[in-house]
Amino acid sequence: MSNLQYIKEDIQNIAEAIEAVLGVDVTIINQDLVRVAGTGTYLDKIGKKVNGYSAFNKSLTERIEIIIDDPSCDEICKECYNKGNCKEFAEVCCPIISDNEAYGVIGLIAFTDEQANLIKDNKDSLMNFLRKMADLISSKIKAQIKSYEVELEKKKLETLLDSIDKAIVSIDVNGKIDKYNSKFKEIFNLDNNIKSKNIFNILKFINTPTVDNFKNNKSCSFHYKIDGYELKGIYNISKIILNNELKGYVIDFIDKKDAIKNYNKINKDYKITLDNIIGNSEVINNTKKEALMASKSTSTVLITGESGTGKELFARAIHNHSPRCDYPFVAVNCAAIPDNLLESELFGYEEGAFTGAKKGGKLGKFELAHKGTIFLDEIGDMSLHLQAKLLRVLQEKELNKIGANSNKLIDVRVIAATNKNLESMVKKGTFREDLYYRLNVIPIKLPSLKERIGDIPLLIDFMILEYARKLNKDVIGIDSDVIELMEHYSWPGNIRELQNVIEYSVNMSSTPKITRNVIPNRVNNIESEEIVINDDNIRTLEELEKREILKALNKYKNYKKDKELVAKSLGISRATLYRKLEKYNIISK
Ligand SMILES: Nc1ncnc2c1ncn2[C@@H]1O[C@H](COP(=O)(O)OP(=O)(O)OP(=O)(O)O)[C@@H](O)[C@H]1O
C-alpha cells in the first residue's frame, strides 16, 4: 500500500522549493497519472489526471528519464493528441522509483523561451538534480510505508487485546501504566486518563514490585473495592525482558464471575435442554413436563432418584429453560467435599477470617451463582451444622460470610438433589425437618432405568453413536438379543452404568454390531447364571459389592485418576464410591 497521495504535502513543498530555486514549473504525478503536486500553471490542476499519451506516461511505464527540448519535432510528441497545440517549450522528467516499483514521475516544464533555454543549456545537471529529488521523494515513500506498517501492527495488536476475555495492562518497572485493553478499563471501572499513572495507586491490591512478589509468574487472587464497586478475581504477572534486561510487566486479570459464566457456555452440559435428554417412555415424559413447569418458577426444587439417573442433567436442563439461563449454573457436590471445607466452599470468607485464610478472601459458590442457579448435589450428606446455615440462607436470602461484618443479599435459585430417602432421615433426626420442607417445594422424582426399560434401545443407539465417534470405531449398532439381555439386567448404576457398559462394548467390538460376546459378564445373564450355578458358597450382596470395589481399586491402583476410574468401572459416582469406601472401612491411597 502506498501512493504519493499520502505524502502530498511533503512533495508539494519539494515542488515549490525547486520552482523557487530554478524558476521553472514543477509537476509530480502518481502511478494513476493523477497530478499530486504542481507549481505555477499546474497548481490548479492538482488532483486531475494528465492525458493518456504523454512523456510522463512513457517515463512512468518504461521507467526512463526523458528530456524534450523541442516538442514540435520530438519523436515522443509525435503521437500526442495535443500535438500542434502544446504550450510547453521544453520538458525534463524522471520516474520516482522505490524498491523496484515506480510510484510516479517528477518533471520540470518550460513555458517561456527563457525557461526552455535554461533546460537546454543545463540538461545533464538538471537531470541529475531531478534524480536526486526523485530519490528524496522515494525515501519519503519508504518512511510512509514503514509508518503505515507500524500503525497497522499496532491496530492489529489493539484489536487482538480487545477481543480477549482477560483484562490486560503493561507497566514499566516502576509501575507506570503503558498499554492496556478495553476490558481492563471496563472491569475496574476506570476512566480514559490512566495512561502514565502508577498502577500501584490505582489497584492497591498489587504490591510494588519487589524481588519477591514479582519473582515468580504466579497467580494471585484479588479483591477490588472502590466507591461501592466490587470485583473479585485472579491476576497473573509476566515479565517483559529484552536483551536480558527487565523492562516492565504485563498483568492480566480474570473476573471470577466471568470465568464461571464462560466455563458454563463452553461446557457441553450448558446446552442441555429437556428436549435433548434421551427418553420417550411415559414416565420420563411426565418427568420432563414437571421439570419444564419447575423451570418457570423460582421455588426450590428437590430432585430425587437413584445414583446415575440423571439428576444433575435435569438440574442443568431446568436452569437452561429458566429465565436465569444467561447467568451461572454452579454445581456443588456436598458429599465430595469434607464438611470443614464445604462451609467456605459454599459461603466463602473474608480476608483474615481465620488463620490460613487466603489473601483477598474467598468467593463462595452462592456468590458465584448470583442471579443464576446453585445445584446442591448429594444434599443428604450435608452435616447438621451446615444444614442450619443453609436453612438461614434460604430463609433470609442473605449470606453471612465467615469473617464478614454485614450480610449480603443474594439472588440464587436452589436445586438440590439426593439419592437418599430424606423423609426417613428426617424421622431418624439426621436431616432437619425445616430444611427438608424448604427444599422440597417442587419435588421431582427421577425414575430408575429399570422403571423405563422402554427407553433402553433409544439410549443405547445414542450412546453407541457417541462412543463410536469418541473412540474412532466403526460400530453402528447392536444385536437384538443383546438389547434383550440389557432389558432384563437390573441396572443398579442406572444410566451411568449403561454408559459404562456401552463404552466397554464399543471398545471391545471388532464388528460393526455389538454382539453378546463383547458385553461385560455382569450384563450377560447366562454367564452370571453359570457362575451362580457353579459356586456353592452364597455370599451376601454386601460381600460381593466389597469384593468388586477391592478388585477395581487393585486394578487402577497405579493410575493418577484411580478413584475416577474405579467409580467409572463400577458404574457409580465418585461420591458414591467414597461413601462405600467409608461403609466397608476400606482404606485406600
Ligand atoms: N436421559 C439421558 N440421556 C443421556 N444421558 C444421560 C441421561 N440421563 C443421564 N445421562 C448421563 O448419565 C450420567 C449420569 O447422570 P447424572 O450425573 O446427571 O446423574 P445423577 O443422578 O446426578 O448421578 P449421582 O446421583 O451419582 O450424582 C451422565 O453422564 C449423564 O450425561
Image: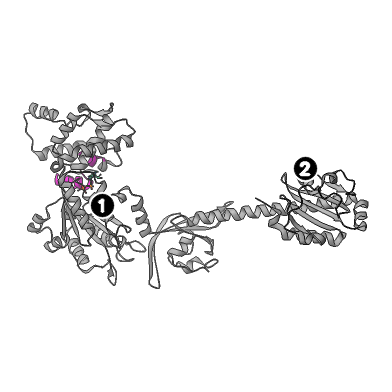
- The image position of residue 156, as x and y in percent, is 55, 53
Between disc 1 and disc 2, whose residue precedes? 2
Image position of 525 (left or right of 73): left
- Disc 1 target residue: 317
- Residue at x 26% of width, y 52% of height: 316
- The image position of residue 202, as x and y in percent, is 47, 68
Visible in this render: residue 123? yes
* Label 2 SS: helix
Q: Give whichever of 335, 24 is nearer the camera.
A: 24
Q: Which mark, by number, is residue 62?
A: 2
- The image position of residue 162, as x and y in percent, is 49, 57
**Does the Cβ of the disc 1 residue fall within 8 Å of ligand 1?**
no
When the figure is inspected, residue 467 is found, relative to residue 327, above or below; the finding is above
Q: Main secondary structure of the magenta part?
A: helix
Q: Which mark, by number, is residue 415?
A: none
**Is residue 348 found inside the magenta-colored segment of the image?**
no
* Label 1 SS: helix
- The image position of residue 278, as x and y in percent, is 23, 44
